[in-house]
Image (cartoon, rainbow, N blue to C red):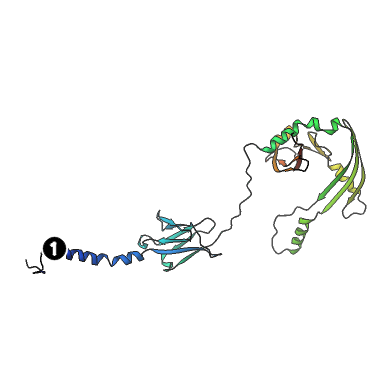
């Protein structure tokens, strides 16, 4: 068999060399092409133009994908395996696009979504307000001034009335908006009175109106209304307002049927602790209840 490399030495050695050169010539031109198959894409916020870090990217309908880096960038691998991108990130609208729509230096913009969550209140295992209310209930007979003490005092009554308005108003109604703004900062009606009260235990009481005024009225004949509506103490099991009786929250039955929430705890200059507790009937409760708040004082060391 004639050789192509006559006189050049070992024929088998040159055959092997030619084969290796052919392999290198085939492979090396492919290397730049393989490097160019990966494309870097940037993801930014459509409003602020800032990078969106840690967005989720899914390649086509496969269970393959990646995550954008801290600069909002990621690489697209071999395009032959898929033809679409699915991009999602918390706080943004999901985006789906075809690879053919991406240029060599493409930037993807995600539209932010504003999500408003309803208020969530987290309660401890043991409601701290219940401990305070139980102590108040246990001390009721001892602290009830009507049972143990003769007294006389001046009582200041204040009653306000306001219109019930929605939290937000539809646009376009200027007159309704002005009424809403007025009601937000002002009372529709204000009644004030000062009365002199005398009491002999256990049930002998007398109250006389000394002075009173009603906003917008020259002769405030209804100034006595607060003294008739507002009870002087909350030590009875039921609180009577005109013809109605409401379950007192500071009772054993009230503790079971009211929801109590410790809103705040303050310490005044004398060292007394003041607990601010709100109360309202429990959901689906069948009682005739009240809704309001209590300020309970606790002396130091008590």
Q: In front here: 1 or 220?
A: 1
Quadrant position of residue 238: top right
* Image position, residue 163 (x, y; %): 78, 53
Where does the C terminus fall, quadrant-wise?
top right
**Which residue sits furthest left?**
1
Report the front residue among 262 and 213.
262
- From the top left corner, tell me how far across and down residue 192 is, in percent: 87, 48
In percent of width and height, residue 82 lies at: 38, 60
Q: Which residue is mark 1?
A: 13
In the rendered view, would you say 255 is above or below 193? Answer: above
Note whether 100 is above or below 247 in the view shown.
Answer: below
Residues 169 and 204: in front is 204
Q: 64 or 179: nearer the eye?
A: 64
Classify 10 Å Cα crowding around label 1: few (below 14), some (14-19), many (20 and above).
few
Please give left or right for residue 47 compared with residue 296 in the image: left
Residue at point 69%, 35% (across, down): 131
Picture residue at 84% right of the left edge, 47% below the top: 158
The answer to whether 298 appears left or right of 30 in the picture is right
Residue in view at x 84 percent, y 33 percent? 145
Q: Position of residue 198 (x, y in %)?
A: 91, 36
């Amino acid at each position: 068999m004639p050789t192509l490399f006559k006189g050049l030495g070992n024929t088998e050695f040159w055959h092997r060399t030619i084969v290796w050169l052919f392999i290198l010539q085939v492979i090396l031109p492919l290397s730049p092409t393989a490097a160019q198959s990966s494309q870097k894409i940037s993801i930014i916020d459509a409003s602020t133009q800032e990078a969106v870090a840690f967005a989720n990217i899914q390649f086509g309908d496969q269970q393959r994908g990646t995550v954008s880096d801290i600069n909002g960038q990621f690489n697209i691998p071999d395009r032959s395996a898929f033809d679409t991108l699915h991009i999602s990130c918390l706080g943004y609208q999901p985006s789906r696009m075809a690879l053919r729509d991406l240029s060599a230096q493409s930037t993807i913009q995600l539209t932010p979504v504003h999500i408003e969550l309803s208020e969530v209140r987290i309660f401890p295992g043991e409601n701290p307000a219940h401990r305070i209310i139980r102590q108040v209930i246990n001390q009721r007979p001892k602290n009830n001034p009507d049972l143990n003490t003769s007294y006389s005092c001046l009582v200041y009554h204040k009653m306000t009335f306001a219109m019930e308005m929605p939290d937000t108003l539809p646009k376009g109604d200027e007159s309704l908006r002005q009424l809403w703004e007025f009601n937000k900062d002002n009372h529709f009606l204000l009644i004030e009175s000062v009365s002199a009260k005398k009491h002999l235990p256990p049930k002998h009481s007398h109250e006389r109106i000394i002075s009173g005024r009603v906003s917008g009225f020259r002769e405030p004949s209804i100034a006595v209304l607060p003294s008739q509506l507002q009870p002087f103490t909350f030590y009875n099991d039921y609180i009577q307002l005109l013809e109605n009786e409401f379950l007192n929250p500071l009772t054993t039955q009230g503790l079971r049927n009211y929801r109590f929430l410790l809103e705040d705890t303050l310490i005044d200059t004398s060292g007394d602790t003041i607990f601010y507790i709100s109360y309202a009937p429990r959901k689906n409760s069948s009682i005739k209840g009240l809704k309001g708040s209590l300020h309970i004082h606790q002396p130091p060391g008590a």
